Amino acid sequence: MRTTTLPIVLFTAFATSLVAQSTSVAVPAHANQVDGQQSLSMPFGKAGFRTQLLVSANSVAATAGVISGLRFRADRASAPLAATSVPNVTVSLSHCSLGLGGLQTTFANNVTSAATQVFSGAVNLPAQATGYAGPMGWDIVITFPQPYVFTPTQGDLLIDIVGNNAANAPANFYLDAMQGGGSATKFGVAGDNPSFDFLNLVVGASGGRPRDLSPGNTVEFTTTTGWTTPAGVTAIGFDGLPAPFDLGPLGAPTHSVYINPIATVPHSWQGSFIGWYTTAAVAIPNHPAFIGLPLYGQSVCFDPTANALGILTSEAGEVRVGDAFEQFPMQQVNAADPAAATGTLVNFGNISTPEFGAVPVMLEGIFQ
């Protein structure tokens, strides 16, 4: 009995361990779904800089982690971007006892335990082509010569990145950045219009904040023009196309379809002091099951004089419905001088209502 039971027990434990483990962790967890609503030039977008990222322990691992590398990604709205390389970069990791929300502007105060330098060298930033639905790839890669052991019970994770180069250099690369709540971004381009009236798509929450892109609120896809009011529709769907469907061969050069529509809302133009607008509103049911829901929209106008197909298209909008009460699992502080003692906390809100944010990061290694 023992000769058969023990191997079975060991196999079961090993299988359970494999299921519980992961080899990569995205922070925040929903970063793999969509592009973030913000962008930042640090780290890496400036040659000389210092960035500290505080990552909540429970977003890294439940019980333990062995971190062997980091990945970052470019900002989709900033593409295309030329390839570049940032020399003289160091990365240090440590456990931090300040707690999420406690990151300070003085860099030294954030290092509350012994730090381990895990990387020293150049960081390559690959060229970025125009992006469409979904986020850009995690192709800014930093691999550690020796892994770092992270223990959640010892504190949160502090990632300290320094570009030991000339201070205050202009930015030449931008990384994707996120904040709490949902996100609303655009991609693609509006096609040419012979009337020279620009067809613009504005996407966001009726309340105006990313946290309003949440259950119980309304997502708005608003089309604007300067002086024309062509008939048309706003197409709404749950999926964006991985690459645009070119309408040129059908008779509408420069125009493309960017989404997979499942419903349309007819345009109903209203005047404003700067032109005309029409809004397609999507009410999100007030239930947590809708957190994470993706929505896509694109405006299509019908004008027989525009081209042989008689179609005008806008760029596309991408929305992720988020949690209005989410505690964003990261904080970031930056300085454009690698020798600076203090930096500036990333705040996408204001002084009275701060909305801390950071560049998303993918941790590579083994996590349980």
Image (cartoon, helix red, strand yellow):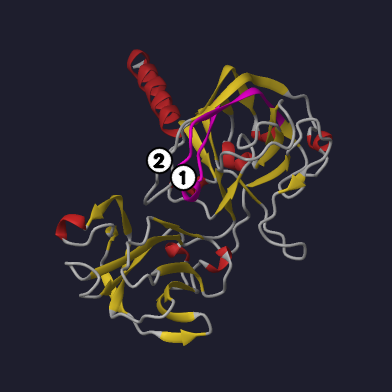
Q: Where residue 58 sits: x, y (%)? A: 61, 42
Compare residues 42 and 353 and report the one nearer the observer: 42
User: Which residue in the protein does label 2 denote?
Assistant: 129
Segment tinted magenta in the rendering: 68-94
Q: Is residue 334 visible?
A: yes
- Does residue 155 show up? no
The residue positioned 28% from the left and 57% from the top of the image is: 254
Q: Give the structural element (helix, strand or loop) at label 2.
A: loop
Nearest the camera: 342 or 15?
342
Q: Would residue 334 appear left or right of 198 to someone viewing this image?
A: right
Residue at image mark 1: 79
Q: Quadrant of residue 91?
A: top right
The residue sitting at 58% across, 67% down in the picture is 209
Quarter assignment of residue 181:
bottom right
Report helix, strand or loop for mark 1.
loop
Looking at the rendered structure, the kind of residue marked 1 is Ala
Q: CA distance from mark 1 to mark 2?
A: 6 Å
Q: Nearer the viewer, residue 271 or 367?
A: 271
Quarter of the image that includes the N terminus: top left
Please report whichever mark, 1 or 2, sits nearer to the chain's N-terminal start.
Answer: 1
Q: Position of residue 40 (x, y in %)?
A: 61, 46
Mark 2 surroundings within 10 Å by alpha-carbon count, few (fewer than 14), some (14 through 19), many (20 or more):
few
| Image marks 1 and 2: residues in contact by CB distance under 8 Å | yes
